[in-house]
Image (tube, rainbow, N blue to C red):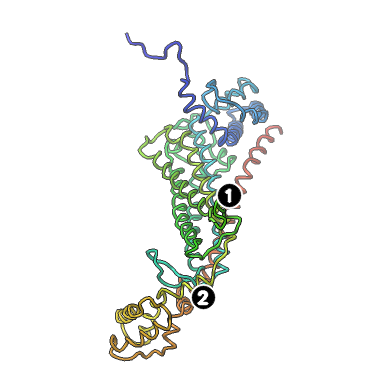
Amino acid sequence: MLQWGLKPSEKFPAPVYRDTVLAINFEDAKKYFLAPLLEIHYAHTLMLEKQGILTSAEARTLCAALDSLDLDHIQRAIYDGTYEDLFFFIEELLTESAGEVAGKMHTARSRNDIALTLYRMQVRRAMLRTAEALLAARKALLDLATANVETVMPAYTHTQPAQPTTLAHYLLAAIEFMGRDLTRVGEAFPRVNQNPLGACAITTTGFPIDRYETARLLGFEGLQVNSYGAIAAIDYVTESASVVAVAMVSLGKLVQDMLLWSTKEFGFLRLSDAYVQSSSIMPQKRNPVALEHARILASRALAEAQSVLTCAHNTPFGDINDSEDDLQPLVFTMFEDAERALLLFAGAMSKAEVNRDELRRRAAGAFLTVTELADTLVRTEGVSFKEAHSLVAQTVAACGADDSIDTIAKNVIRLAPEVFGRALRLSEHEVREALDPVEFVNRRTIVGGPAPDAVLPELARAQEEQKGAALWLAAKQERMAAYPQWIREGVEALDT
């Protein structure tokens, strides 16, 4: 008869399982989860004592055992399979210190809700670091935009020069999307910062625990209420990955432009010597490597975010390893790479020099101002935009490669009788004025336009948004810095 079970010579864990899973997860746990795991131990113990599930003496013994842990020893520990994971390793250390009372610490909880609490505690900190990096990148752009409100430059559509704008107007577009990135972090953060502790394995417990108390002690802003969802739902991490993905796509597009602008052919932007490298063979080279690194780091973070979503896709709605120890380091690496990309970009842009003369020269060429010439014809000649567009298009064709204002003005005046059936009412001076790139910009004063009168209020608004986001971040960082002291105060109160 077939007998199920392990052969006498086999025991858990199998060497290959130990080496490919448990040992690696043990190292990851020491790196990411040791500090929050101990905080959970303290908070849960204090809550059990408050609820009368532990005596004060028992809680004091447990907290003293936690205080006595040698963290350096734990960090140096090499996984050998004696204990399944870091949780059981520390549990044994606590048993050595506190005796059998150590087992009471695990009343009304499971590794399931402990793990989800650990993950959320680390993700929330990573989100705040990402917000801080976004603020730094946005500040660099705000400073550059403020210094270039009147810096005329060509705007591009379909990678071709299109119309004049200003550098401040261009940068405000990026400042706005980074503002939206910050908003997405701010909106996602409270959904991450919810306490799953108390869900236990998946259906809570029969003990009269206080989930709100552990939430308070651990700096959470509320509960992940449904116990099944607290264990099974992982939208806290998929939403976080989505926030990072959106931010990195936008950052990558911006970095791509900055790299193009740094080429000799464009010559719009010059990075500080601190952010370029030379060549081992070509002494003249100034390679904008900081932007290249920012680009690949943004791409890595995006790929890691996509991987997080892929790992979560089509997995069961329940407690499952797919969203646990093997996935979480990828989540943290995603945040780390996003933070690196943003901070590097911020540093490079904060020291970059703008070639205003070249930007102005390019804005005046390639027929970029003829849209305003067509608009001017509509306003002054009483013709439709279609008619004006036709005359200007024929004018551009007649000019050939000569895109000077003189040539354009002469041709539009010459061709007007053929197209309109009469001479222009506009003087040559008025035509030339309509073709000036500065005049082009200054006439676009509506909300969202490039004229200084339109840009300055938007810069002021963005600065206020920046202050608001910085205040939000400071408040969250203060809470993260404060809650360990709340735990310590609770421990000290046990002795009074």
Q: Secondary structure at mark 1?
A: helix
Q: Is residue 51 visible?
A: no
Residue 35 image position (x, y, % from top left): 60, 36
Give the residue number, with chain letter if any, for mark 1: 476
Q: Measured along the vertical axis of the image, is residue 457 above or below residue 41? A: below
User: How many numbered circles are shown?
Assistant: 2
Q: Earlier in the sequence, mark 1 or mark 2?
A: 2
Along the viewing direction, whichever of 332 and 371 lies nearer the viewer: 371
Give the residue number, with chain letter if any, for mark 2: 453
Q: Secondary structure at mark 2?
A: helix
Write the residue at 51% across / 45% down. 335
Residue 291 image position (x, y, % from top left): 52, 54
**Image quarter hosting the C terminus:** top right
Write the residue at 47% across / 46% down. 300
CA gap, disc 1 and disc 2: 36 Å
At label 2, the amino acid type is Asp
User: Which residue is outermost to the top?
Assistant: 1
The mark lying in front, picked from 1 and 2, is 2
Q: Measured along the vertical axis of the image, is residue 440 above or below residue 469? A: below
Write the residue at 41% across / 74% down. 368
Q: Is residue 409 visible?
A: yes
Residue 229 image position (x, y, % from top left): 43, 38
Q: Residues within 10 Å of mark 2 (few under 14, many from 20)?
A: some
413 lies left or right of 99: left
Residue 247 image position (x, y, % from top left): 47, 53
